[in-house]
Amino acid sequence: MNISEDEWKQFRSVPAKEKIDCMETYLIGVPGRRYNMKEVASLVYGNENYGFKVSMIHRCYNFNGQNGSKYRNGCKFEQTYGYRVTRKDIEAFVRKYPDGTFNKGITFEDFLLTRIKEPGKTYSEASSVQAEEQPPNDRMRFILIGIGSIGILIILLIFASGGFLKHWKACILLALFIIGVFSIAREI
């Protein structure tokens, strides 16, 4: 990979968070959406003219060609190795190689393979450990929807038993609680 001294100097001045944000947006993206460099620049920097900077970051990490959404959910890497790439993987890569990998010949995929090939672990075990590290947003949403559904069931049972007028204050409080639970679940 040909990186000029000026580009490498500029790359080294880019904060790690920007590198991670750019790489996550480009490599993982949003399900069903593949971003190009200008779109990543618009999302990360608010200006598509920073596409050259996004490109420079990826070239300094030894990427070439089209890599948009290469590591999205369900990608070829995940299908082959049973391991879903996340922001945490990108963060670890950038922390390990803050000055890039273009001059070392190391690719992100090389890094991922060493990360999941820890001694004594299978690919599925590495993937399950990684899943435990991620925030359980989907699980939490499911739990909140379950709690809200139970609350609705309780109100319906009170109403069906004819106790609604007797317990109307509790029903109103429970309804407000249910609304709050569903609002939180929707935001997760």
Image: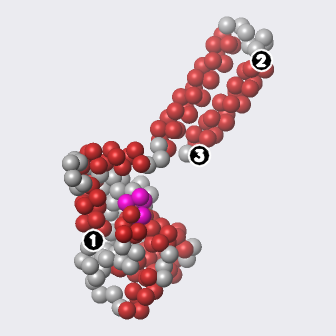
Q: Which amino acid type is shown beneath numbered disc 1?
A: Thr
Q: Position of residue 174 (x, y in %)?
A: 70, 25
**Neighbour tally class for label 3: few under 14, some 14-19, many 20 plus, Cα within 10 Å:** few
Judging from the image, what secondary structure is the residue with disc 3 in? helix
In the drawing, what numbered circle is on residue 168? 2
In the drawing, what numbered circle is on residue 107? 1
Give the Cα distance between marks 3 and 2.
29 Å
Give the Cα distance between marks 2 and 1.
63 Å
Nearer to the camera, 168 or 19: 19
Q: Where's the N terminus, which quadrant?
A: bottom left
Up the image or down, 15 lies above or below 77; here it is below
**Magenta region: which residues?**
87-91
Q: Residue drawn at (30%, 67%), measured in percent from left and top?
A: 108
Give the Cα distance between marks 1 and 3.
36 Å
Q: Which amino acid type is shown beneath numbered disc 3?
A: Glu
Q: Please, which residue is most extreme toward the top here?
A: 161
Q: Is there CB contact under 8 Å for labels 1 and 3? A: no
Horizontal side, residue 164 vs residue 80: left or right = right
Pointer 3 residue:
187
User: In the rendered structure, does residue 69 fall within the stretch colored magenta?
Assistant: no
